[in-house]
Image (tube, rainbow, N blue to C red):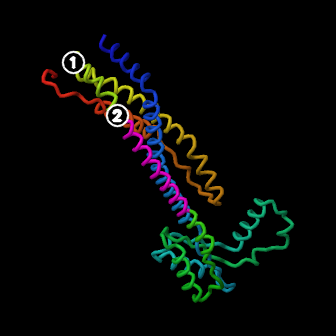
Amino acid sequence: MKAIWIARCTRRQMGAHRRVVFAATAAFGLLALVVGGAVLSARTSHRWGAFVGQNVHVIVYLTDDVDQDRSRGLAEILRRAPTVAQVTEVEPAQALARLASSAATIGTGATVLDGLESAYFPRSLEVNLAPAADLSERANDLAKRLRGVPGVAQVDAMTDGLARLSVWVGLGRKLVLGVLLASAVLALATLAAVFLRSRGVARGRAAVLVQLGETTSGIRLPSSLWMAMAALGGGGGGALLITLAWRPLIHRLETSLGMAATTPLPSLGSAELAVGIGLAVLLGLAMGFFATPLPQTDDHE
């Protein structure tokens, strides 16, 4: 009988205060989007940083008299530099094969490459720099040093494209952070308003129930239950939305920026979703519990 009475009280409260229940559900949903978005944004930011760090930042073209041994020796020296993450030696035949592959990708006819031989291409070194905030400056500094090295014909620091990509990545991070902060403020403000509204509504009902001899759990449990259900609905809906929408959104954004990262797009695991929704339900239970004040009477235990 006790459980049936609490269930009826919960249903009556939800029916009498539908706007408050809807606001609580929306607030928990927005909070789930903020938390999930923050986690996925951090992972996406790391992914973008890795993408920028893995791209070739300096290409060193060697003179015709540099043989394979000298090219290998120069590459070994570059690998010892603290700012260098990786050095790839590109032979003339490899350069021609890459050009042919690029031509095939963009649909250029094979006749365009007729007559080209690997001897037309110089040996080169592709230098990847370690990820850093001042990547363009590091690339320029390394290029300046390499231009005076014997056997180096030309150095391309690729700073223009790198700078543009870094600017877009930085702008994306700031925009996402701004949206998350604004959403977090809105979600917390809505939850605070729901809490205060529920507290005001529950005060009179609790006073009556205390006079009737109802226990503390009987008074507070209905509010805790409907708030927990709102948290479950809102948190689950927010988690489902961000799970379905995040990957397509990031894929479209990376495509527009020309980013072809090889690592999988970030996502939330099942355990993370379960823990997040569970914490939202616990928060709802706590809010409903404390939103029901108990009048201070001498005869209430």
Query: Mark 2: which amino acid?
Result: Leu
- Quadrant assignment for the C terminus: top left
**Which callout, 1 or 2, points at the residue further toward the start of the chain?**
1
Q: Which residue is mark 2?
A: 282
Overall secondary structure of the magenta section: helix
The region drawn magenta spans: 169-194
In the rendered image, the residue lying farthest to the top is: 1
In the rendered image, the residue lying farthest to the left is: 298
Name the quadrant containing residue 31. top left
- Quadrant assignment for the N terminus: top left
The image position of residue 245, as x and y in percent, is 57, 43
Assign a secondary structure to mark 1: helix
With 176 as the anchor, is 67 left or right in this view?
Answer: right
Assign a secondary structure to mark 2: helix
Which one is nearer the viewer's eye here, 3 or 295?
295
Q: Residue at x 39, y 36 (%)?
A: 194
**Does the magenta run of residues contain 189?**
yes
Which one is nearer the viewer's eye here, 122 or 198?
198
Name the quadrant containing residue 218. top left
Which one is nearer the viewer's eye here, 134 or 281?
281
Q: Residue at x 21, y 16 (%)?
A: 213
**Does the magenta run of residues contain 233?**
no
Query: Mark 1: which amino acid?
Result: Gln
Residue 13: assigned label:
none
The image position of residue 198, as x and y in percent, is 35, 31
Q: Which residue is mark 1?
A: 211
Q: Residue at x 53, y 64 (%)?
A: 170
Q: Residue at x 74, y 70 (%)?
A: 96
